[in-house]
Amino acid sequence: MASSLCLFLLYSVILQSAICVAAQTKSTIAIGDSHTAESNTSPWLLSPSGDFAFGFLPLNDTNLFLLSIWYAKISENTVVWYANGDSPAPKGSKVELNANDGLVLTSPNGVGLWNTTEVLNSGVSRGVFNDTGNFVLEDGDFNSLWETFKHPNDNLLPSQVLEKGVKLSSKLKERNFSKGRFELHLQNDGNLVMYSINLPSGYANENYYESQTVGSNKSSAGTQLVFDSSGELYVLRENNEKFNMSGKDGEDDDSSKVSTTDFYLRATLNLDGVFSLFKHPKSSTDSSGWTIVWSHPENICSYIAVAGSGVCGYNSVCTLGDDKRPRCQCPKSYSLVDPDDPYGSCKPDFIQGCVEDDLYDFEILTETDWPLSDYVSQKPFTEEQCRKSCLEDCFCSVAIFRTDSCWKKKLPLSNGIYDGSTLGDAKAFLKVRKDNTSIIVNKNNNRGTLVLVVSVLFGSSAILNAVLIVAICVSTSMILQYEKKLRRVSRSDTSVETNLRYFTYKELEKAANGFDKELGRGSFGIVYEGVINNNTSSETRVAVKKLNNFLLDQAHKEFRNEVNGIGLTHHKNLVRLLGFCEGGSERLLVYEYMSNGTLAKFLFNSSDKKQRPSWKLRLEIAIGVARGLVYLHEECITRIIHCDIKPQNILLDDNFNARISDFGLAKLLNMNESKTNTGIRGTKGYVAVEWFKNMPITTMVDVYSYGVVLLEIISCRRCVQEMDQGEEEKAILTDWAYDCYRDGAVDALVEGDNEALDDKGKLEKLVMIAIWCVQEDPVLRPSMRNVIHMLEGTVEVQVPPYPSPVSIQYSLI
Ligand SMILES: *[C@@H]1O[C@H](CO)[C@@H](O)[C@H](O)[C@H]1NC(C)=O
Ligand SMILES: *[C@@H]1O[C@H](CO)[C@@H](O)[C@H](O)[C@H]1NC(C)=O
Ligand SMILES: *[C@@H]1O[C@H](CO)[C@@H](O)[C@H](O)[C@H]1NC(C)=O
Ligand SMILES: *[C@@H]1O[C@H](CO)[C@@H](O)[C@H](O)[C@H]1NC(C)=O
Ligand SMILES: *[C@@H]1O[C@H](CO)[C@@H](O)[C@H](O)[C@H]1NC(C)=O
Ligand SMILES: *[C@@H]1O[C@H](CO)[C@@H](O)[C@H](O)[C@H]1NC(C)=O
Ligand SMILES: *[C@@H]1O[C@H](CO)[C@@H](O)[C@H](O)[C@H]1NC(C)=O
Ligand SMILES: *[C@@H]1O[C@H](CO)[C@@H](O)[C@H](O)[C@H]1NC(C)=O
Ligand SMILES: *[C@@H]1O[C@H](CO)[C@@H](O)[C@H](O)[C@H]1NC(C)=O
Ligand SMILES: *[C@@H]1O[C@H](CO)[C@@H](O)[C@H](O)[C@H]1NC(C)=O
Ligand SMILES: *[C@@H]1O[C@H](CO)[C@@H](O)[C@H](O)[C@H]1NC(C)=O
Ligand SMILES: *[C@@H]1O[C@H](CO)[C@@H](O)[C@H](O)[C@H]1NC(C)=O
């Protein structure tokens, strides 16, 4: 009896002290106050009304903690703000208020995990936890120095304001608070946008939502995203008008009005990229939990990010729910790479190799498509032909059949979408392995190592074991090949897809200011000047090329392939392609901006011969062009014949380096498949004879054009020029140059150019190289690599023959 009384007393003491601890939880802290991350501790602070708590919350792994703010009165630990999402705090970590640095979070072994650097040395006096859920660091005069409301993560609360330039960032996973794949950003132009980013670089893809609150004659630009204390969320414009987020297109919608006295409200950028207003009843008797009031955008599944997997992971399929949130699902015979990440990628549960096709069958999915993953399309085709073609092709993982067209696609599949309204007649034939009884993919190993059922090995005969071992060897080598293939495919995929940015037409129209400043016109289209935000904060000058409509006849895929090929070429003597647009009937390419214009302008600007650009600089340019051509011809992944080398297509950058442009557009010709030429490409004066005769088009056509350009660089005159009477023999530069060379009078080519005349040996050598290049017989022309060797002097230049032997001249006609 006594002992039970004792126990009771002890119990009450413990209970009382627990109550005391709870009662002691305060809403203000002073300098020197600290809090330690331990299991089962109460929060550090509570807001005065007790609605919000501030302290350490254990993550899934209970040895890690998140310094955060959450709702104290509801059972779900809904986190509204967190400090150290990227560096969770180990058990025993301490957060302390310090006068110089504000809040400082350190791990038990003294490593700084996070702090409020911005208040550095500004004399913090106290921390105040406001009833709104805002934690504020104040100085001695009660001025706010730092607020959690000004450093949001993925959440906004009533009375919180998002200023221009500030972003919301989604979480990575449900219980992983690292930076996720989506951002909401009130841009400096007032536009509220949402877009996906490529992790880990943070490179921003095109947006999938925009409020269009940019300034113009008709509308006033946005200045803030305001979540007011009554629960209205709107973009406040400069003229104080409101763009309401609640209704569709900013129209007011009373049905979505929620009382902040009865409900907790939060606006969250979910980890699936959807921005939603959530409500939760404050009353403890109502158990409805968090429900969605409204969401943006309308349909996130239809957002096709060219760089990346789309909203769902690779090989996954996105279905839009009634709440406008995406559901990601792996197709049959595929499963999640990370079972805890339903928005992640899916992997096949079987190994697909180049073995007999009777091992495979099709899973038929209706109204489903992976729009960007095709490597070939065929038309007209019947459904049966489509199936057969995919079955017999070991690269084919899925074939989409629609009316009379068949698209074959390879892994990994991206931007998967299920949509009955737009894909009604599309059928996806997903290739799966018929019989997976003998093969199990080890779920712990994402690389798909084969594991055979061990009991079979132990329990069966030696012969059977031998058979099984052979089977293991065979399948392992199959997997290695498969993996090699997969790696190769995915490497080229990522380099293609991460380098080039996909623009919408609207974006480029804006970037080029309505295409008002023309930089030049070429055979492929008109080039305009523009400015893009490459990272939503920095600006880059670009050249936007609007392609002529002739390209539009080409299949969609062909354009994309060519653009991807161009995107893979990087060289300091080539103009870099930054991105492209393929919207409706328009095709546009976005290039680096070249500040010093074309070589043509540079060479032919001055009629005064004494005003020629420096000889030294001209030599550098000649070598630069040659280097760019060597790269195109021999070094880049898809060899490219330019077909239209001329001074108008050679640009000069800030440092007057020669940069070749317009390459790759005339079709990426493979070296030996080039016989079928579909009409002359190139420009009069620069084109080689092959174009006029039934001869294969090879890299030698570029060598010819280079020779002409080299003569132009030497003489600073155009290759064909009207001459005064008595000087007609000079009209065609190539002929005149040969005559001068033959007569030992190369000086005439650079008349008045003292710099060049002083460098006569070099001058004569250059003329000889040029004459080699313009030989009408392509076999006699040197390769561009040889040209470089000759220019650099590592190879002696031989005496060139007459470039237009009679036989060829006559056979031309
Ligand atoms: C993580 O926590 C969630 C919810 O608290 C739980 O459903 C899940 O099983 C946990 N996962 C692990 C790996 O502990
Ligand atoms: C605060 O963080 C910054 C960078 O994150 C670090 O350089 C600085 O040393 C930290 N200060 C303290 C007091 O930990
Ligand atoms: C704290 O909240 C009250 C209303 O609850 C508000 O009037 C006050 O401005 C807030 N203070 C700060 C610093 O946010
Ligand atoms: C969250 O995910 C990132 C990236 O996968 C990982 O590095 C980090 O350890 C994860 N954090 C936690 C707490 O699991
Ligand atoms: C984007 O800009 C931010 C700063 O505004 C910078 O930290 C980040 O590295 C940039 N990312 C890229 C890919 O340029
Ligand atoms: C917008 O205003 C500017 C100057 O105020 C004017 O030049 C321009 O034509 C206007 N544009 C439209 C579409 O009204
Ligand atoms: C936005 O909502 C406010 C308050 O409900 C309303 O007064 C205003 O007219 C609405 N604005 C628009 C453009 O619908
Ligand atoms: C084959 O794999 C699928 C997907 O993992 C599974 O559902 C099915 O049961 C397997 N079939 C057999 C015969 O094991
Ligand atoms: C972004 O712009 C900066 C400066 O204009 C430039 O150095 C950088 O290469 C650009 N990045 C991309 C990805 O275009
Ligand atoms: C073209 O010539 C004019 C005058 O002769 C000169 O001012 C200008 O800088 C030249 N432009 C180039 C690109 O050389
Ligand atoms: C060449 O480009 C540089 C850098 O942009 C610029 O300062 C210079 O004026 C340009 N020269 C000409 C002739 O345009
Ligand atoms: C191209 O053709 C030449 C001779 O016609 C041959 O030697 C070479 O191997 C071929 N190259 C390719 C890539 O087919």
Image (spheres, rainbow, N blue to C red):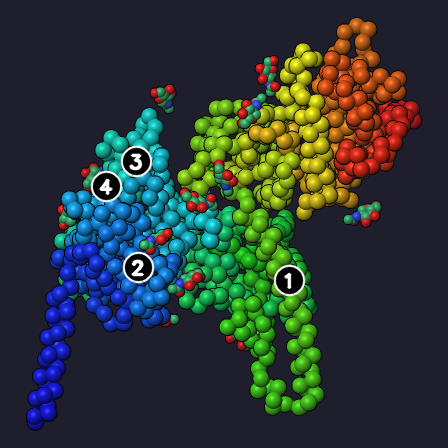
Q: CA distance from mark 2 to mark 4?
A: 44 Å
Dot 3: element: strand
Q: CA distance from mark 1 to mark 3?
A: 50 Å
Residue drawn where x is 69% and y is 84% of the image: 466
Front in this rendered view, residue 414 or 593: 593
Front in this rendered view, residue 700 or 357: 700
**4 vs 1, front mark:** 1
Residue drawn where x is 31% and y is 65% of the image: 93
Amino acid at dot 1: Lys
Asked if the residue at label 2 sits under 8 Å from ligand 2, the reply is: no
Q: Where's residue 291, x and y in %?
A: 26, 58
Name the residue that disc number 3 marks.
Answer: 222
**2 vs 4, front mark:** 2
Q: CA distance from mark 1 to mark 2?
A: 45 Å
Name the residue that disc number 1 marks.
Answer: 484
> Ligand 11 falls in which quarter?
top right
Asked if residue 363 lies left or right of residue 50, the reply is: right
